[in-house]
Image (cartoon, rainbow, N blue to C red):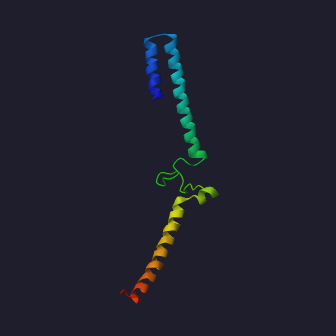
Amino acid sequence: MTTTASVTTIKYAENVPGVLSKGLALTLSFMSSTMVLVLLVFTLLHAFVWHTLFPNDVAIAMTKRRLVKEKKPFEEACDIRRWTKQALIKHNSANKDFSGENEMGSSSSTLP
């Protein structure tokens, strides 16, 4: 988008010569070139230095190993997925024990 604005401003500066239009064209061209250069540098860093260009997509990743972040102790304590899995396992095992006792207890007792 900045490149389009830059090209448009350059065309305007050609048709309407003036200090303001030429200064604006120069400024937008510089900003556009800087953004493209920054994107190129960060893409190269992610690809060849940090090896994180495609961290989750094994089909198009540049490496076969997956990027696995090590969890910090605070994150492990607050890991909601792990907590819910443990809660469900405990809940299911408690239900099995409770229903087993209930069936045996209800068969031996009779209601008047």
| Image coordinates for residue 28, horizontal then vertical, percent | 51, 23
Is residue 4 shown above or below 68? above
Relative to 27, residue 54 above or below: below
Residue at 47% in and 23% down: 6
All told, the count of numbered labels is 0
The answer to which quarter of the image holds residue 15 is: top left
Quadrant occupied by the N terminus: top left
The structure residue drawn at horizontal position 57% and vertical position 44%, both measured from the top left corner, is 46
- Whether residue 39 is visible to the viewer of this picture, yes or no, is yes
Single out the residue that lies furthest toward the left.
112
Q: Position of residue 22 (x, y in %)?
A: 51, 15
Q: Which residue shows up at 52% across the image and 32% down it?
A: 36
Which image quadrant for residue 71? bottom right
Nearest the camera: 18 or 107? 107
Q: Is residue 15 above or below residue 74?
A: above
For the view shown, which residue lies furthest in the right direction? Answer: 73
Find the residue positioned furthest to the bottom. 108
Classify residue 68 as left or right of residue 8: right
Where residue 12 appears, as percent x and y from the top left, is 43, 16
Nearer to us in this view, 5 or 41:
5
Q: In screen coordinates, is 45 left or right of 102?
A: right
Residue drawn where x is 50% and y is 66% of the image: 85
Residue found at the very far front of the displayed protein = 112
- Quadrant showing the C terminus: bottom left
Front position in the image: 48 or 103: 103
Foreground: 71 or 94? 94
Indicate the quadrant where residue 107 lies: bottom left
Q: Which percent across, then down, holds residue 27?
A: 54, 21
Residue 72 visible to an observer of this rendering? no
